[in-house]
Image: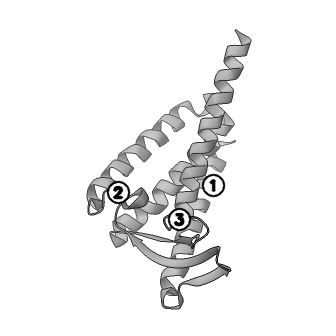
Amino acid sequence: MKKKIFFILIIILVAIDQISKYFIVKNKSELPKSIINNILSFNYCENRGIAFGIGEGSVQLISIITIIIIVIILTAIYINYSKIDTKILLGSCLMISGGIGNLIDRIFKLYVVDFIDFNELIKFPIFNFADICVVIGVIIIGIAYLTINKEQTNTR
């Protein structure tokens, strides 16, 4: 993956996140809206913490920590780009995009807009596109590290 594509993908994913949240906020008076009967709906929720509402009321601290983490990861990736496995880059791209998407909400709204709700199918907190990016990014990086370590072990 070329550096340019890496950064363009981050911009695209952040844009998708922000556009989806914009439409949810704009139409929140019409929510909840069932997408798949009794399984999935769009609902409006203001999350003033991080995952599962942890750290509620600490928006400034969460924002500062998020900025520091994103800057460190982006700097490390920028410096070592050619040495990093494509799977790690993809996972990092997703994680950074999700982090930036939720950071934008925290900075400008002082909360994160969540809207994807699995209703009664599974008891799970409401989440958003940025959260999906972070989770998938972590999974990709985890799998990549396991396979890279396994490959390195097998070549020894």
Q: Tag 3's secondary structure?
A: loop
Horizontal arrangement in the rendering, residue 10 relative to residue 104 (left or right): right
Q: Residue furthest bottom?
A: 29
Give the alpha-carbon distance from disc 3 to disc 2, as whole Å. Answer: 17 Å
Tell me the residue at 31%/57% (across/down): 55
Tell me the residue at 61%/61% (across/down): 12
Which quadrant holds residue 83?
A: top right
Residue 30, percent across and down? 53, 91
Residue 25, percent across and down? 48, 81
Tell me the residue at 64%/29% (across/down): 146
Q: Which mark is residue 59?
A: none
Circles 2 and 1: CB atoms closer than 8 Å: no
Mark 2 vs 1, N-terminal side: 1
Badge 1 is on which residue?
Answer: 9
Amino acid type of disc 1? Leu
Circles 3 and 1: CB atoms closer than 8 Å: no
Amino acid type of disc 3? Lys
Horizontal arrangement in the rendering, residue 45 relative to residue 24 (left or right): left
Residue 77, percent across and down? 53, 37
Mark 3 vs 1, N-terminal side: 1
Q: Nearer the viewer, mark 3 or mark 1?
A: 3
Amino acid type of disc 2? Ile
Task: Estimate how packed mark 1 is, as few (under 14), some (14 to 19) or many (20 or more) residues with alpha carbons within 10 Å.
Answer: some
Which of 134/12 is in front? Answer: 134
Badge 2 is on which residue?
Answer: 54
Horizontal arrangement in the rendering, residue 37 relative to residue 100 (left or right): right
Badge 3 is on which residue?
Answer: 123
Picture quarter with the N terminus = top right
Give the alpha-carbon distance from disc 2 to disc 1, as whole Å. Answer: 29 Å
Q: Nearer the viewer, mark 2 or mark 1?
A: 2
Residue 30 seen by the camera: yes
Q: How is the image coloured?
A: one colour
